[in-house]
């Protein structure tokens, strides 16, 4: 849970995650053209999200595709909700 919170502390990373979550699978090329971010910065943010367990990446030919790990995301939200109880 701490790793996810750390990953989400960066607003640009949250925006990357939001774009990934909005589709079944998102290519890094689509992310790069939608955001004003150079490839190295996007790669860094993707790595942080992947290390935190929020996304999975897979190679699809020349493209790298990212998918939200919905089960992990729902677990994280349930953990946060437990603080309100």
Image (cartoon, rainbow, N blue to C red):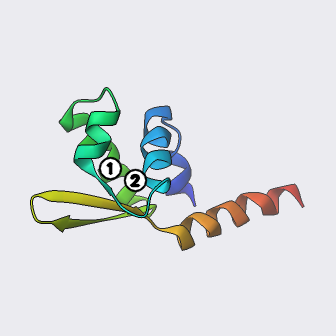
Image vertical order of residue 33 relative to residue 24, above or below = above
Q: Position of residue 18 (x, y in %)?
A: 50, 46
Left or right placement of residue 78 versus residue 26 in this view: right
Q: Quadrant of the C terminus?
A: bottom right
Q: Quadrant of residue 30?
A: top left
Question: Could you say whether the residue bearing mark 2 is in a helix, strand or loop?
Answer: helix
Residue 7 visible in rendering: no
Residue drawn at the location 48% of the way across and 36% of the way down: 10
Left or right placement of residue 75 versus residue 6 in this view: right
Nearer to the camera, 80 or 70: 70
- Residue contact between numbered discs 2 and 1, judged by CB atoms under 8 Å: yes
Image vertical order of residue 84 relative to residue 78, above or below = above
Image vertical order of residue 74 relative to residue 10, above or below = below
Nearer to the camera, 53 or 35: 35
Residue drawn at the location 45% of the way across and 46% of the way down: 19
Q: Position of residue 9 (x, y in %)?
A: 53, 39
Question: Could you say whether the residue bearing mark 1 is in a helix, strand or loop?
Answer: helix
Number of callouts in the render? 2
Residue drawn at the location 45% of the way across and 57% of the way down: 23
Residue drawn at the location 63% of the way across and 63% of the way down: 76
Residue under pointer 1: 46
In the displayed image of the protein, which residue is found farthest to the top?
36
Q: Residues within 10 Å of mark 1 (few under 14, many from 20)?
A: many
Residue under pointer 2: 49
Q: Position of residue 66 (x, y in %)?
A: 33, 59
């Amino acid at each position: 849970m701490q790793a996810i919170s750390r990953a989400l502390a960066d607003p640009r990373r949250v925006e990357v995650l939001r774009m990934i979550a909005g589709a079944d699978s998102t290519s890094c090329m689509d992310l790069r053209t939608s955001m004003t971010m150079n490839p190295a910065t996007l790669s860094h943010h993707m790595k942080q999200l992947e290390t935190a367990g929020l996304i999975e990446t897979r190679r699809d030919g020349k493209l790298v595709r990212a998918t939200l790990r919905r089960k992990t995301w729902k677990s994280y939200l349930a953990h946060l909700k437990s603080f309100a109880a």
